[in-house]
Amino acid sequence: MGTQQQHQLEQDDQLEYQRDHHASEAGLVQGLRKDDLELEAQDPKKKTKYEEEDEEKEEEKEEKENLGLEEELSVERIFEKQAVPSWKEQLTVRAFFISLVLSVLFSVIVMKLNLTTGIIPSLNVSAGLLGFFFVRTWTKFLDRCGLLKQPFTRQENTVIQTCVVASSGIAFSGGFGSYLFGMSARIARQSADSSTSDIKEPGLLWFIGFLFVVSFLGLFSVVPLRKIMIIDFKLTYPSGTATAHLINSFHTPQGAKLAKKQVKELGKFFSFSFLWGFFQWFYTAGSDCGFASFPTLGLKAYQNQFFFDFSATYVGVGMICPYIVNISVLLGGILSWGLMWPLIENRSGDWYSKELSPKSMNGLQGYKVFIAIAMILGDGLYNFLKVLSRTLIALQSQLRAKDVNNILPIEDQVSPAVTSALSYDDQRRTQLFLKDQIPAWFAVGGYVAIAAVSIATVPHIFPQLKWYYILVIYLFAPSLAFCNAYGCGLTDWSLASTYGKVAIFMIGAWAGSAHGGVLAGLAACGVMMNIVSTASDLTQDFKTGYLTLASPRSMFVSQVIGTAMGCVISPCVFWLFYKAFTDLGTPKSAYPAPLAVVYRNMAILGVEGFKSLPKHCLLLCTVFFGAAILTNVIKDCIGKKRARFVPLPMAMAIPFYLGSYFAIDMCIGSLIVFLWERVNKAKADAFVPAVASGLICGDGVWTLPASILSLAGVKPPICMRFLSRAENDRVTTFLTGKA
């Protein structure tokens, strides 16, 4: 989630399920064949089950072929006549110009998602598709004019993809919706501490400076290990692999035809989403006005955050996210706002004072935040230990296999596993992947130099974060970055936010309350998150480059340039939101930044302990912490077939603080996908990502003109508000009497 996080089941469970499935398949086939023969004897004209299934498969295959989705046995055979450009030729001016434009677009989208719910789906398909579309359109125009000097290649497409994802990723790992904004007085007033000493107000310049000194270390930490990860250990990196297949398909004749159709659908729904956001703006002249406050399920349900808010963004997010994520979010909203919070509210006067402000962390708000934190920590701890144990076990197995040859895989050494037995694709990819080396001395020297600058600089930005705290983090960071990158290759799940939470508790407790532990913990979270996040992102990109024959050097340079873009673009985008929406970060705002409150209260918990919790809150937190772990244990024990029906605790925790309104949007997105797949699965598989991306991008882009209008003092002309009949009568009487 988010955000950009998705739980992946253990490979052992998958293999066990496949063995059971295949073991029973033979007997099942015999039984079905017998039934079919008996049926044929009774009615020779009636089709057997297998004939019907074969016809369905043929129809689906034919539909996929019409859409340009047929699979090829060897990808590199298709491209063998095309010369692979050098790593310098892959880095073109037009590629970085398109990357800059798309980086602004996706940074706005990620920032909006970050400041609303924190759920950020993968936007890789959108980035790859739009990058292909823009450059292909430009090169076709130049070709018709006779001015085209360099054709558009899949390697250049990969450079654009890498740069855009690296840049927009800073909008998440930069902490604008979590640890950085959690340092502000606005968030502190909603948290459990009343101290005003542990705050640092947002500032554009120090945002940019901080990100520049902490965001590049992760890149240098994993560069020497790229051969181990990609060639020797053959890690999957599912997202990187999927992105590579997507880019490869774009550059085939059938794939280009499909991409053209996908772009057309994306543009259609982009326009609809943008215009829908523009139309809604006219009715939002005051608080609780407009379609976003439409009590679709009744006023009582609306008061408990159950309503459809007509958000194209979260309908699109729901179309991309798996069904179980959306259902988990909805179940979490029903459990919290439909059951728990009304029951706890009935205990006001006993469990907490009735005189407390609704925003007080000693009242109902405290239960909402800390129980959500307990579930997030329980889920994160379990999966952290699971992925770490799988990483260590797999690493031990890999190294044991290498020990047979008494050779450990290192950067400049040819792997014994790379032999002539490899397929043509793997031989060609390995040859080109090892061609452009990045010297180990360059990576180590770069890491040490940037670490030294960071240790000297960061304490000036955050005096509470002492230089020796940062030194300790940087000593352990390469090992943690490797573990995260390796685990991401196995499970496709980055634990960057979990490592950040560990840093909050460790550094916060080390600093202590008297020495600014809250601020030190939040700043340490940023240092740790940026290292491990960029490390896993780069290894994903190396995998994508390996499968598209893009040079590791061009991948590294593209990642560095994308990260540099993000260090400037993301703070500017946040600053636009911060200045345009003066209520940003407050519970009733369109941008409540829920993770900022969560992260700050984690830091408070790490510094002050359990004394900051309201009455009986510790008991409830313990129950939900244990329930999150137990749910994950059950999910991993019952096998893949049944586990897909078990809800995800991390997803359930999000609406505990926010409410269920966005969950309804996401479930509507799931319903659209479900019905589409029932009608035409091949078209749904091809066009769902494009349609969803159009809905997300259109609504996200509307945020820019909405922000500009707000800064210019232009206000919507109409307030559309919904009242009960009794309230409406009182308003009518008041207005009539006034007249």
Image: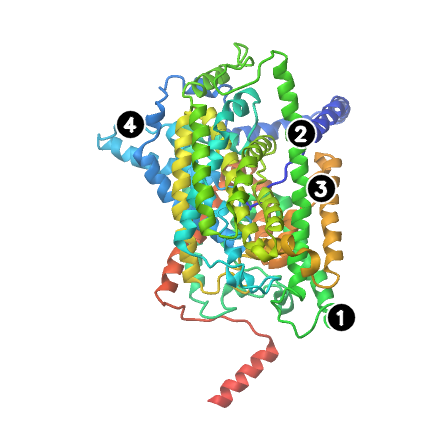
Taking the spot 46% from the left edge, 19% from the top edge, the residue there is 429
Quarter-of-image position of residue 435: top left
Q: Secondary structure at mark 1?
A: loop
Q: Earlier along the polypeptide chain: callout 3 or callout 2?
A: 2
Circle 2 residue: 11
Circle 1 residue: 350
Q: Which mark is residue 150?
A: 4
Q: Earlier along the polypeptide chain: callout 2 or callout 1?
A: 2
**Structural distance between the alpha carbons of marks 4 and 2:** 43 Å
- Count the labels in the image: 4
Q: Do labels 1 and 3 touch, CB within 8 Å? A: no
Q: Secondary structure at mark 3?
A: helix
**Structural distance between the alpha carbons of marks 1 and 3:** 34 Å
The crowding category of the residue bearing disc 3, from other C-alpha atoms within 10 Å (few below 14, some 14 to 19, many at least 20), is many
Instruction: Residue 237: give x, y in percent of width and height.
Output: 55, 30
**Structural distance between the alpha carbons of marks 2 and 1:** 49 Å
Q: Earlier along the polypeptide chain: callout 4 or callout 3?
A: 4
Is residue 288 or residue 616 the one in the foreground?
616
Q: Earlier along the polypeptide chain: callout 4 or callout 2?
A: 2
Q: Earlier along the polypeptide chain: callout 1 or callout 3?
A: 1
Q: Secondary structure at mark 4?
A: loop
Q: Is residue 366 above or below residue 259?
A: below
Circle 3 residue: 632
Q: Given the current orientation, which residue lies at the most extreme left position?
A: 146
Quarter-of-image position of residue 370: bottom right
Taking the spot 39% from the left edge, 28% from the top edge, the residue there is 554
**Which amino acid type is shown beneath numbered disc 3?**
Asn
Instruction: Residue 326: give x, y in percent of width and height.
Output: 62, 48
